[in-house]
Image (tube, rainbow, N blue to C red):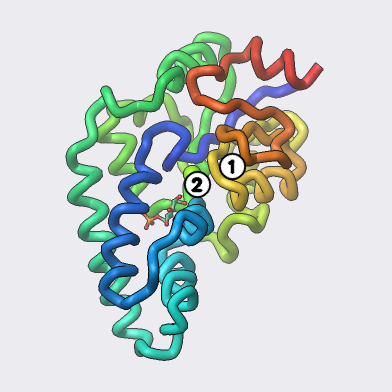
């Protein structure tokens, strides 16, 4: 029986996956890597430096920059991303997610955040939903990013729950894989997430009843 929910942030709670995409697109133009929908998709859920490496590799530029130059490029992307984040308001919470958080809270479920983003606390603050979360997994303390199970295993630990009582919510393949490998129940948003235990096309469809119906 599920007792806790671990939320991804970008693309699940708010449409910030779009902001990450915009900022990475700018960076790809700068380094001369062609921006494609496939490249954009492959970055979802992936850490900042790993995303930069994927963009450089896609254009054959992985050896064109020193470590310090790569750090500078990642910082530039992050500065552009933060400018977009600062425009967020509670109205930017994706359809149905506020109601779902309220439903979980009202029924006494544990709620934590399992985002790879170091900007997650800031995003929650602008969306004004920080108080729903009893904990936030600190991505700076992780050895491996998604699709490694570490982040979702840490989320279960934060809630003091065994994996089989935890569900994770994700919009990206790397995240679904991370949840599945952690032995938890994966809930995916997006038609392409075939490996998810529970799948919704839109965030507006999520509710405890809708999840239980697919798990039955
Ligand atoms: C999330 C997003 C990724 C982003 C990563 C790191 O997983 O889906 O697109 O690259 O977090 O975010 P950060 O804000 O730390 O650069
Ligand atoms: Mg995401």
Quadrant of the picture in which ligand 1 is shown: bottom left
Q: Which mark is residue 155?
A: 1
- Going 47% across and 31% down the picture, which residue do you hit? 134
In this view, the residue in front, 154 or 169, is 169
Q: Given contact means CB atoms under 8 Å apart, are the residues at marks 2 and 1 in contact?
A: yes
Q: Position of residue 175 (x, y in %)?
A: 60, 47
Residue 24 quadrant: bottom left
Q: On the picture, is 118 further left or further right than 110? A: left
Q: Position of residue 100 (x, y in %)?
A: 49, 17
Q: Position of residue 128 (x, y in %)?
A: 28, 27
In this view, the residue in front, 142 or 12, is 12
Which is more N-terminal, label 1 or label 2?
A: 2
Is label 1's Cβ within 8 Å of ligand 1? no
In the rendered image, is residue 140 in sight? no
Q: On the picture, is 16 further left or further right than 193? A: left
Disc 2 target residue = 137
Relative to residue 96, is residue 175 depicted above or below?
below
Q: Secondary structure at mark 2?
A: loop
Q: Position of residue 87 (x, y in %)?
A: 18, 38
């Amino acid at each position: 029986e599920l007792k806790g929910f671990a939320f991804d942030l970008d693309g699940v709670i708010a449409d910030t996956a779009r902001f990450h995409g915009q900022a990475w697109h700018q960076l790809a133009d700068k380094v001369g890597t062609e921006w494609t929908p496939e490249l954009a998709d492959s970055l979802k859920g992936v850490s900042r430096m790993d995303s930069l490496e994927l963009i450089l590799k896609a254009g054959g530029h992985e050896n064109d920059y020193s470590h310090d130059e790569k750090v500078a490029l990642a910082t530039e992307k992050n500065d552009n991303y933060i400018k977009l984040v600062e425009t967020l308001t509670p109205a930017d919470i994706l359809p149905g997610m506020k109601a779902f958080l309220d439903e979980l809270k009202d029924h006494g479920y544990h709620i934590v955040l399992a985002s790879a983003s170091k900007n997650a606390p800031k995003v929650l603050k602008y969306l004004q939903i920080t108080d729903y979360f009893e904990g936030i997994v600190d991505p700076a303390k992780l050895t491996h990013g998604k699709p490694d199970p570490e982040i979702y295993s840490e989320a279960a630990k934060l809630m003091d729950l065994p994996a089989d009582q935890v569900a994770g919510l994700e919009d990206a393949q790397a995240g679904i894989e991370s949840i599945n490998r952690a032995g938890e129940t994966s809930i995916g948003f997006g038609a392409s997430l075939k490996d998810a235990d529970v799948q919704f096309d839109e965030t507006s469809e999520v509710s405890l009843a809708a999840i239980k119906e697919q798990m039955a």
